[in-house]
Image: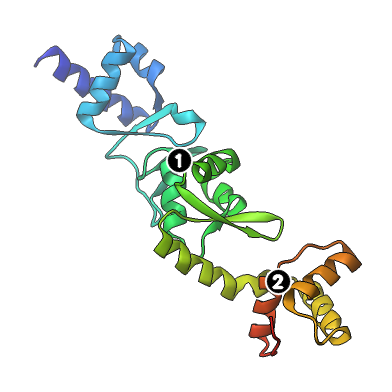
């Protein structure tokens, strides 16, 4: 057996002991340099974590990814898509109605707002204002268009009952006001920012007719 083959065999044996390792620990165990360990990992196949700045490694044969392509060992996350940026883009693209930073952070168990902003600025994601936050959409215009339509259909659900009541009361006071004027009136009376599209979705949901 060549030295390289022997090292690869010993590398695989390490992952029988525990499923995730940092590369410096592997190098110490195998008594090889870090560049050599990286070469061995490429030979056997591996994933690096999307959490912890990609500092954890596991063999490609170990993860049992869920339907979203994610696998966690304790607080260490791995993705079939690879890096955090690729994982965020993949999750958003697969979502029927896009995802907020909060939804993505909960799913990935890590903060990802800064990376999402970077992806948006690089045109790898689109985004749309939703209340006081943003919902992130796919870069592909056709997919993003479908996601936007889905958002419009579900926005009314995002309005709590007490806010929906405020909207309807304001509508009774000003039956000729458009969606935008109703939103501004709510903001003026309560300081609450809601979108005209949310009011439209609420009216559509309850079969109320109004000219935008």
Taking depth in this image into account, of 97 and 126 the one nearest to the observer is: 126
Image quarter of the N terminus: top left
Residue 196, numbered circle = 2
Q: Is residue 96 visible?
A: no
Q: Which residue is mark 1?
A: 85
Neighbour tally class for label 2: few under 14, some 14-19, many 20 plus, Cα within 10 Å: some
Q: How is the image coloured?
A: rainbow
Q: Can you tell which quarter of the image residue 130 is in?
A: bottom right
Q: Can you tell which quarter of the image residue 151 is in?
A: bottom right
Q: Is residue 37 above or below residue 76?
A: above
Judge left or right: residue 148 versus residue 13.
right
Give x and y (percent) for residue 29.
34, 14
Residue drawn at x 55%, y 50% as measured from the top left: 104
Neighbour tally class for label 1: few under 14, some 14-19, many 20 plus, Cα within 10 Å: some
Q: Can you tell which quarter of the image residue 26 is in?
A: top left
Taking depth in this image into account, of 69 and 1 the one nearest to the observer is: 69
Judge left or right: residue 81 versus residue 8.
right
Judge left or right: residue 9 versus residue 58.
left
Residue drawn at x 31%, y 10% as measured from the top left: 33
Q: Is residue 54 visible?
A: yes
Q: Secondary structure at mark 1?
A: helix
Image quarter of the C terminus: bottom right
Q: Is residue 97 above or below residue 88?
A: below
Give x and y (percent) for residue 10.
24, 20
């Amino acid at each position: 057996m060549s030295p390289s083959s022997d090292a690869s065999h010993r590398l695989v044996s390490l992952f029988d002991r525990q499923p995730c390792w940092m590369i410096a620990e592997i190098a110490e165990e195998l008594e090889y340099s870090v560049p050599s360990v990286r070469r061995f990992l490429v030979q056997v196949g591996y994933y690096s974590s999307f959490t912890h700045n990609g500092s954890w490694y596991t063999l490609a044969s170990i993860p049992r990814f869920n339907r979203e392509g994610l696998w966690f060992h304790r607080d260490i996350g791995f993705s079939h898509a690879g890096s955090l940026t690729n994982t965020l883009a993949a999750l958003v693209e697969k979502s029927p109605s896009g995802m907020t930073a909060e939804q993505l952070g909960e799913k990935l168990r890590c903060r990802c707002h800064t990376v999402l902003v970077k992806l948006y600025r690089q045109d790898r994601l689109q985004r749309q204002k939703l209340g006081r936050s943003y919902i992130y959409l796919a870069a592909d215009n056709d997919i993003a268009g479908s996601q936007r339509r889905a958002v419009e259909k579900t926005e009314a659900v995002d309005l709590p009952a007490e806010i929906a009541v405020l909207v309807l009361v304001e509508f009774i006071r000003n039956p000729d006001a458009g969606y935008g004027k109703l939103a501004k009136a709510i903001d003026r009376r309560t300081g609450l920012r809601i979108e005209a599209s949310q009011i439209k979705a609420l009216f559509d949901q309850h079969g109320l007719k109004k000219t935008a």
